[in-house]
């Protein structure tokens, strides 16, 4: 069998396992009594199965070259800073406009307690997102690149697989109180749009840094900063219109900004690659 066909089969196996992993978790929970809603063994299986599948496929194929486990700090510290600052920047911008336009209310809060909550959330989510990012950006993305899939299809495929992996999470695992403003199916459909748009940013960050760790950091900040401010702490309360347009997590303006940032990263990466090509091809003169 040709190597390219093997790669396609491994990739198809990976995507299939990802798409059924959540439902295997649902099945596991149905077989176990008194599983806590939102923190069950089935959710644990759903979370770890993508990375374990990626590791198994890499072990079988003896292929670790593009896993992205090396941080590549040298020459890339600025990109780690960019990964750190993207979500706070978009959050401050969108929430600032929401407050200015009367689409949001700011409740009284203790800055020290809020900072501690954000820090704890970021640290916890950093470890959680190792499982996610080394699956999406540590396996799915590089294997699509290896098969010479064009950029737009990479964004679409990786974004949809990432989103549809969340299907069981939105439709079953999460408690009902998360769905006061939007139905479970509505959350899943919204997630598909969001994650396809976000995937441009994550794919390009991986390609620029050549490491998954910048994506792990960026994802941890997303889970630990805007999510804490708007969802967990209640510090920011958005109106219905504010939630639609200016939510830093799922608002239209934030989504457009994240897509724009991703496309900007793409243009920077292409220029860097073009510069390297010219440098290699340029003849040496004496």
Image (spheres, rainbow, N blue to C red):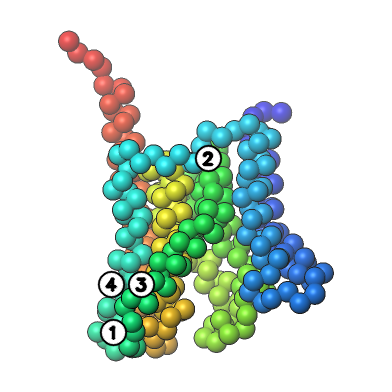
| Left or right: 6 in relation to 153 | right
| Left or right: 267 in relation to 163 | left
Depth check, front residue: 242 or 38: 38
Whether the residues at callouts 1 and 4 have beta carbons within 8 Å, the answer is no
- Front position among marks 1 and 3: 3
Give me the residue at 31% from left, 22% from top: 281
Whether the residues at callouts 1 and 3 have beta carbons within 8 Å, the answer is no
Which residue is tagged 1? 99
Which residue is tagged 4? 93
Which residue is tagged 3? 115
User: Label 1 neighbourhood size at 10 Å, few (<14), some (14-19), many (20+)?
Assistant: some
Which residue is tagged 2? 67
Give me the residue at 49% from left, 66% from top: 193
| Label 3: element kind | helix
Residue 269 coordinates in the image, percent (x, y): 34, 43
- The correct choice, above or below, for 258 with respect to 12 in the image is below
Marks 1 and 4 sit apart, C-alpha to C-alpha, by 10 Å
Q: The C terminus lies in which quarter of the figure?
A: top left
């Amino acid at each position: 069998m040709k190597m390219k066909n093997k790669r396609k089969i491994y990739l198809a196996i990976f995507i299939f396992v990802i798409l059924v992993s959540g439902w295997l978790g649902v099945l596991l929970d149905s077989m176990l009594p008194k599983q806590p809603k939102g923190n069950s063994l089935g959710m644990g299986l759903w979370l770890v199965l993508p990375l374990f599948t990626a590791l198994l496929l890499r072990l079988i194929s003896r292929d670790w070259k593009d896993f992205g486990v090396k941080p590549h700090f040298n020459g890339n510290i600025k990109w780690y800073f960019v990964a750190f600052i993207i979500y706070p920047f978009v959050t401050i911008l969108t929430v600032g406009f929401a407050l200015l336009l009367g689409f949001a209310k700011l409740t009284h809060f203790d800055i020290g307690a809020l900072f501690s909550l954000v820090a704890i959330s970021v640290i916890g989510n950093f470890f959680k997102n190792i499982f996610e990012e080394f699956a999406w950006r540590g396996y799915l993305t590089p294997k699509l690149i290896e098969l010479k899939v064009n950029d737009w299809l990479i964004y679409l495929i990786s974004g949809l697989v990432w989103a549809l992996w969340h299907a069981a999470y939105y439709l079953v695992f999460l408690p009902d109180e998360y769905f006061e403003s939007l139905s479970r199916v509505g959350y899943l459909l919204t997630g598909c749009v969001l994650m396809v748009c976000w995937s441009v940013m994550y794919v390009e960050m991986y390609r620029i840094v050549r490491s998954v760790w910048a994506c792990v950091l960026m994802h941890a900040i997303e889970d630990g900063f805007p999510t804490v401010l708007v969802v967990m702490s209640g510090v920011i309360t958005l109106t219905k219109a504010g939630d639609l347009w200016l939510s830093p997590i799922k608002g239209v303006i934030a989504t457009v900004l994240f897509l724009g940032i991703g496309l900007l990263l793409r243009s920077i990466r292409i220029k860097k690659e073009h510069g390297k090509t010219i440098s290699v091809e340029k003849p040496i003169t004496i």
